[in-house]
Image (tube, grey):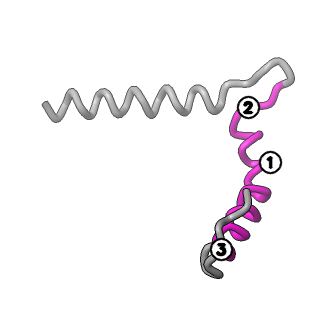
Amino acid sequence: MGIIRTALIGAAVYGAVKYLTKKDAVGRTKMDDIRDKAPEWIEKAKTVVADVKAGHVPNL
């Protein structure tokens, strides 16, 4: 049972890495897009945390 579970997890990780690193027609990968948008998402998360700590409903 353990070897089947390990094989399934390995196949899922392989598929995810292959999907994230596959280049599109322009030559960019999904990972490049994630890296570009990460700072924006971090700033949004910081404002949500500040709103929650202040007892307000976060505005998304």
Amino acid type of the residue that numbered disc 1 sits on in the rendered structure: Asp
Q: Is residue 43 above or below residue 8?
A: below
Residue at x-position 65% and y-position 31%: 21
In the image, which residues are magenta? 27-51
- Answer with left or right where residue 24 lies relative to residue 45: right
What's the CA distance linking mark 1 and mark 2? 11 Å
Q: Is residue 18 above or below residue 49?
A: above
Magenta segment includes 49: yes
The residue identified by callout 2 is 29
- Answer with left or right where residue 15 lies relative to residue 44: left
Amino acid type of the residue that numbered disc 3 sits on in the rendered structure: His
Residue 19: name its quadrant. top right
The residue identified by callout 3 is 56
Q: Nearer the viewer, mark 1 or mark 2?
A: 1
For the residues labelled 3 and 1, say whether their Cβ atoms are less than 8 Å apart.
Answer: no
Q: Describe the element under mark 3 as helix, strand or loop.
A: loop
